[in-house]
Amino acid sequence: MDRRSFLRGLGLAAVGLGACGTALARSVERRLLSFVHTHTGERLTTVYFEGGQYVGNALRRVNELLRDFRTDTVYPIDPGVLDRLFDLQAAAGGSEAFQVICGYRSPTTNAALRKASSGVAEHSLHLEGRAIDVRLPGVETARLARMARQQASGGVGYYQVSDFVHLDTGSVRIWGDPIRV
Ligand SMILES: [Zn+2]
């Protein structure tokens, strides 16, 4: 199915349910995500929501994958981050795994990264398990960022040179490079 007919299908389904695209994605009872971590090479495909609730075992595996790999610190990831990814994949189409650049970030790592780069926030939501940096193979990262901004359900940062989108469950904010797609 090409992108246009995919979108048209979504539109028709949304009319049928009387819901917008995001609500449509959220209404799906079974939410599956696939990840590959770019630093550790670890992969995970898991159904993290089913039967009207989040799946504890799946969340634990996600927490492990999204740990601060530099300090090996595992921290609970806000399931809202996963819903953001799920909604984004529903909008973008495709079934490729999200490539994870960064999930949880410990205070130690954040301080070290802040010394090395001016682009790292002191009170980053990565420190609270409420942010993730990703790209999605098969979808131009600028387009992914644009779709994330259109969903307007949290923070979205676009980093063109590093080729990733930052998503978080904080208030609706946008920053980063201009999007030219
Ligand atoms: Zn980030």
Image (cartoon, rainbow, N blue to C red):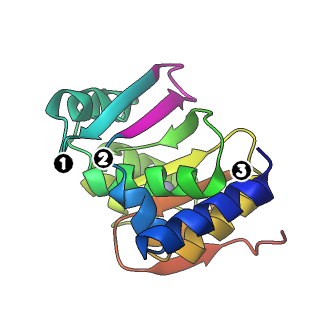
Q: Label 1 crowding class (10 Å Cα cut-off): few <14, some 14-19, many 20+?
A: few
Residue 34 part of the magenta segment? yes
Residue found 20% across the figure and 43% down from its top: 76
Instruction: Provide residue 147's location: percent of width, then percent of height.
Output: 63, 67
Q: Which residue is mark 3?
A: 163
Residue found 61% across the figure and 35% down from its top: 95
Assign a secondary structure to mark 3.
Answer: loop
Circles 1 and 2 in contact, beta carbons < 8 Å: yes
The residue segment tinted magenta is 31-43
Task: Determine whether 51 is above or below 178 in the image.
Answer: above
The image quadrant that residue 142 belongs to is: bottom right
The quadrant of the picture occupied by the C terminus is bottom right
Q: Which residue is mark 1?
A: 52
Instruction: Provide residue 70's location: percent of width, then percent of height.
Output: 40, 30
Q: Label 2 crowding class (10 Å Cα cut-off): few <14, some 14-19, many 20+?
A: few
Instruction: Provide residue 116's location: percent of width, then percent of height.
Output: 56, 51
Q: Does mark 2 have its CB less than 8 Å from ligand 1?
A: no
Q: Which residue is mark 2?
A: 29
Q: Amino acid at mark 1?
A: Gly
